Amino acid sequence: MKKRTENLLGTFCLSLLFMHSANSQETAEVVELEAFITEVSGEETILPSAKTSISVLGLEQSVLETPRALSMITQGQLVDKNIQRVEDLDQFISGAYSAPIFGNIGVPFLRGDLGEVYQNGQRKAFNRNSFPISFNGVESVDAVKGAAPAVFGYGNATGGYLNFTTKRAYADKARTNLRFTYGEWDYARWQIDSGGPINDEWGYRISYEGSDAGSFYRGVDNASNSLFAALAFRPSEKFELQINAEYLDADFTEVPGTNRPTQELIDDGIYITGESISTGSPFFGNTFEPTGTVKIDGSQILLAPGDGASAEVFNAQAILTWNLEDGGKVINRNYFESIEADKNSSYYFFSHLPESTTLESRLEYLKDFQTGDIRHQTITGVSYRYETRKSFVDIFNEYFNPFDVTGDPENLRYPLDQLFGVLPVPGTDGFAIPGGAYPRNDGSGRLTTSLSATLDSELNALGLFAQDLIELTPQWSLLAGIRLDYLDISSEDPLPRPGFEPASDSKSKALWSGTLSVTYQPREFQSYYITFNRAAAVESSSSSGGFGLNGNEIADEVLDNSSDLVEAGAKYSLFEETLYAGLTTFYQKRNRISPRGGVPDEIEIWGIEWDFVYQPNRQLNAGIIGSYSEANYIDGPVSGTPTTQAPFDPSVPNSTFPRPPLGDYRLPGLPRFLLNSFVSYTADSGIGASASLQWQDDQNLDLEGFVVIPSQVQLDVALFYKAEQFEIRLDVRNVTDEFNWRPTSTPFAGADLVTRELPRYYQASLVLKF
């Protein structure tokens, strides 16, 4: 509570400082600083063009010059679609398909694998599903498919990454926007976003957003408060400082989904009822005695009254830019993030994250120069990253099948006295598995069970990088980059068995990453490229990151991961830059060894992605994006991947950690075909309408494909009216009221649970502009 108050007061005081400075300088002359202004027109454009400049590979390049597959989600799209969740972005990103990890996604799923989230070019703390992402401070999003280039170094996941560009301070004039949204299940969200110039050198912006919502899912409700502040200082053309900070306080409920998935449940909503029975071992008693079937609507999820989650997140970033006399530029990026999060589910899952700290400082030197007729655009630098993670987790006692979700929710509780191998977590009412293994009391010499997600770890990482964009001719260019990271990590069990010293270990290793791209741009409006990328990666032991112990040691495998990417693409900006077309083909392989089993856990995927976006004027915009991919394990997956029975037999115990035979399985939870389209038209009068259609091919729910989610479609429509000072909008989601499903866990974690997508629902929004 003390830390929450300090974080909130810190952000609030920063906000008050901005407003006080603005009031004290209200008579000062306002000077327009063009390179420093967030243009209002950004709310209206959704179109990448030959002139659209981005910086997702370390250097400022146009979209056509950037030799990677990427999708842009502009401010206009974020506002128009009321984006509030990471999975909401899928409709704008070819190759993206997100399974709701217990109803909460913190990182994207790109090309069948977990991805990362960056903020203004710096990697945020890993957040697989610890807490919901806040979009209160986000201005736009760039989605890059495939692991980050060498200049950014190692990461936790290699499917791709989202780069959040935060809201920037206004320097040209004062603006205030008020936004209210209300919809089905008492969904309410409100936001005030205000900013303006303080004087001819300073600008500010403050955004507060709150939400309070019920849910279609039984027992679920969510509430959050976010305060974002940005400050900009530009005393001259040679120096600029951008500062932003956000505090998020969220109380939310995970959506574990519905258990006992069968083909009948997917096709017709038919659920097998029955009470739990004992098989003599609660650890392997994941079964029940069937009593019949009943049709359900999907709102019945594995959730007991009182189950819930909370998170407090504070982050701050400072970016300093110096333009040097010799034409070079120095940029210093600094990022800090602090997280506290808790989850408790009575079926039984427990996670307590009392400490998560991330600090990164990166110093970059950018310089353009000539060697004969060849031009070089270089970036070199050094980076330091520090992380601490402390978490207490119990997933060994996650039992799904014994519970009947059609009965009294109070019965969805696992008896605490039957929990396997746990110890009470100090300062909480929960129980977790120790992170270390200790001698048993029976004198057998065997060790107790341990869980690497219970950990207290520290990381220090130093990185050196260099990248050169070589313009060989006006048409041909070569991008080459390399980075070396030296990691030093240590970990200790924060929950040792009484009477034993906590197990601990440390490890150090150097990791390298490399990028090589060739681009051919015969004309300004078209380009072709091929890219080779090798990205280093580490294996996080919990959903919030950190490094745990395996056999009381940090396994070598946690630092041995990598991703190989070969990608070729073509990009066009046609018809006087009113149509953007992109086509990409790729091969990507995740190289990973399971630290728990010491066996390969590799995914291989190849495919094609396409993006077509059309916007001839401010009135009309449309797009068609999609992908086809083949994704398979390579002689996998790692033992412990949940799977359904064949055929599903409720009377046979379904192990929490089964051991399927290794093979080149199709990746479950990922459709081969994904196709999204959207269109929006606004008449001169301000009246308009929009529609978006999302279609996906069938997907295997489980590893063997015993249960298949068939092809599905969702249609969303909206009516709106836009005036100079206000907007009103009515959205109807899932217009045809499809009974759609998604896997509840990651695309490679199995089929013990499945979640029904939301039925048809309505939302109304009002925006006031001052």
Image (cartoon, grey):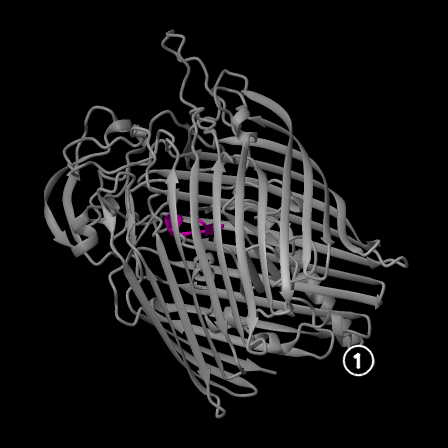
Q: Is residue 553 above or below residue 388?
A: above
User: Quick one: SS at disc 1?
Assistant: loop
Mark 1: few, some, or many residues within 10 Å (few <14, many ≥20)?
some
State the image coordinates of residue 496 (x, y, percent, origin top left).
50, 22
The quadrant in which residue 321 appears is bottom right
Quadrant in the rendering for residue 267: bottom left
Counting labels gives 1
In reply to whether residue 111 is colored magenta, the answer given is yes
State the extent of the magenta-drawn residues as a range: 99-112
Left or right placement of residue 353 versus residue 315 in this view:
left
Give residue 471's position: percent from left, percent from top: 73, 56
Label the magenta part by its dominant secondary structure.
Answer: loop
Q: Is residue 6 visible?
A: no
Q: Give residue 435's position: percent from left, percent from top.
A: 48, 26
Is 466 displayed left or right of 697 in the figure?
right
Q: Residue at x 41, y 36 (%)?
A: 430
Q: Residue furthest bottom?
A: 685
Q: Position of residue 185 (x, y in %)?
A: 33, 67
Q: Residue at x 46, y 19 (%)?
A: 437
For the question of whether residue 425 can be seen, the reply is: yes
Q: Residue at x 83, y 80 (%)?
A: 28
Looking at numbered disc 1 in the image, what kind of residue is underneath it?
Val
Q: Residue furthest left?
A: 292
Query: Which quadrant is the C terminus positioned in?
Result: bottom right
Residue 646 or 28: which is nearer the viewer? 646
Q: Which residue is mark 1?
A: 30
State the residue lying farthest toward the right: 325
Q: Residue 231 colored magenta?
A: no
